[in-house]
């Protein structure tokens, strides 16, 4: 008889090189994506932990940009972690079916559904506060593309810090330039971390080690009206991850100036991928292609 843990996931499939697909058939659901339906409006998406909404993480509108807004302190109870990445996975090794099965005890707290698993690297800047004018949300191009005059007035920001990718990843589509911006959002802010642990990881990283940070990720790719009306030839898309394990490692990577090594479990429920006119109609295939392009 199979254990409940072994039944919680179907056989993992490598759908693209270095990109694995997982279908959770049952789980505890401690971490889930909530969808709130609004009459005549786009559905809002929420990151929920232990039954409570912690972050609003955008919506399912095809022309709306990504944002995250902290609703309630996401920190678990003191001295309690959501995840504890096993040492056999925390250090770099290629993703394979056996590694996915080793992750099952952690994946079991996610809600059932479809996920992708990949390893990627992100060179971080920050952490930024909501009112930091050097962050993405105060960028003139962001405000112009999405027709935003005041980010605070749009009610998309909250008093919660985040990291950003140093430079966007670029993708070209005929005469359209797509800039994919990356965000990493901690569940524990920097002022609650132990400095001695950060220094220890920083020394390891500077000596060549690349310990993994574990993220619950999403990819949102809307098409702004500025593109469909041809008022702009630049569009923005978004890859974001919430830190489930590795807050001290994340801070150490940023201080060391080294790209963070991230193992990302991508939620398809939290993701959206809309297509340009010349990209056909298979958004699922395009999403997989983009995720595979990020995998290392």
Image (cartoon, rainbow, N blue to C red):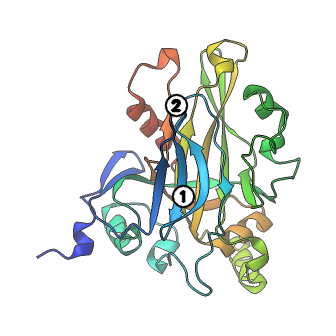
Residue at the outermost left position = 1
Q: Which of 252 and 236 is in front in this view?
A: 236
Tell me where residue 203 sits by quadrant: bottom right
The numbered mark at residue 251 is none
Mark toward the start of the polypeptide (1 vs 2): 2
Q: Which residue is drawn at 56% across and 40% down?
A: 220
Answer left or right for 7 relative to 180: left
Q: Horizontal and vertical percent for residue 61?
A: 55, 33
Q: How crowded is mark 1: few (under 14 residues within 10 Å), some or many (20 or more)?
A: many
State the residue position of label 2.
40
Measured along the vertical axis of the image, is residue 254 above or below residue 173?
below
Label 1 element class? strand
Name which quarter of the figure residue 225 lies in. top right
Q: Quadrant of the N terminus?
A: bottom left
Residue 273: image location, x then y, percent? 49, 34
Residue extending farthest to the front is 39
Tag 2 secondary structure: loop
Q: Residue 294 location, x and y as percent?
A: 54, 45
Give the percent coordinates (x, y) of residue 170. 66, 33
Image mark count: 2
Depicted 106 relative to depicted 278: above or below: below
Q: Which residue is drawn at 79% across and 76% down?
A: 191
- Residue beneath disc 1: 47
Per the model, the C-alpha gap separating discs 1 and 2 is 22 Å
Residue 53 sits above or below residue 141 on the image? below
Disc number lying in front (1 or 2):
2
Image-quadrant location for residue 284 = top left
């Amino acid at each position: 008889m199979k254990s409940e843990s072994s039944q919680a996931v179907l056989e993992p499939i490598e759908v693209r090189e270095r990109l694995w697909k997982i279908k959770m058939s049952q789980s505890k659901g401690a971490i889930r994506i909530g969808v709130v339906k609004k009459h005549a409006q786009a559905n809002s998406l929420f990151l929920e932990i232990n039954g409570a909404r912690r972050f609003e993480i955008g919506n399912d509108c095809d022309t709306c940009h990504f944002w995250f807004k902290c609703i309630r302190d996401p920190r678990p109870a003191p001295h309690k972690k959501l995840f504890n990445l096993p040492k056999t996975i925390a250090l770099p090794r290629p993703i394979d079916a056996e590694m996915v099965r080793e992750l099952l005890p952690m994946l079991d707290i996610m809600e059932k559904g479809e996920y992708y698993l990949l390893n990627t690297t992100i060179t971080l800047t920050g952490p930024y506060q909501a009112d930091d004018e050097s962050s993405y949300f105060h960028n003139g191009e962001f405000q112009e593309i999405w027709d935003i005059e005041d980010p605070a007035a749009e009610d998309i920001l909250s008093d919660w810090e985040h990291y950003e990718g140093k430079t966007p990843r670029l993708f070209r589509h005929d005469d359209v330039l797509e800039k994919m911006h990356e965000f990493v959002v901690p569940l524990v802010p920097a002022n609650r971390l132990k400095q001695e642990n950060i220094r220890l990881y920083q020394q390891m990283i500077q000596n060549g080690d690349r310990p993994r940070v574990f993220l619950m990720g999403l990819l949102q790719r809307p098409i702004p009206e500025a593109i469909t009306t041809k008022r702009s030839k630049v569009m923005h898309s978004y890859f974001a991850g919430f830190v489930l394990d590795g807050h001290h490692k994340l801070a150490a990577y940023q201080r060391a100036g080294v790209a963070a090594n991230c193992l990302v479990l991508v939620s398809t429920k939290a993701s959206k991928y809309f297509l340009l006119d010349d990209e056909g109609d298979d958004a699922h295939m395009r999403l997989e292609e983009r995720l595979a392009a990020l995998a290392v």
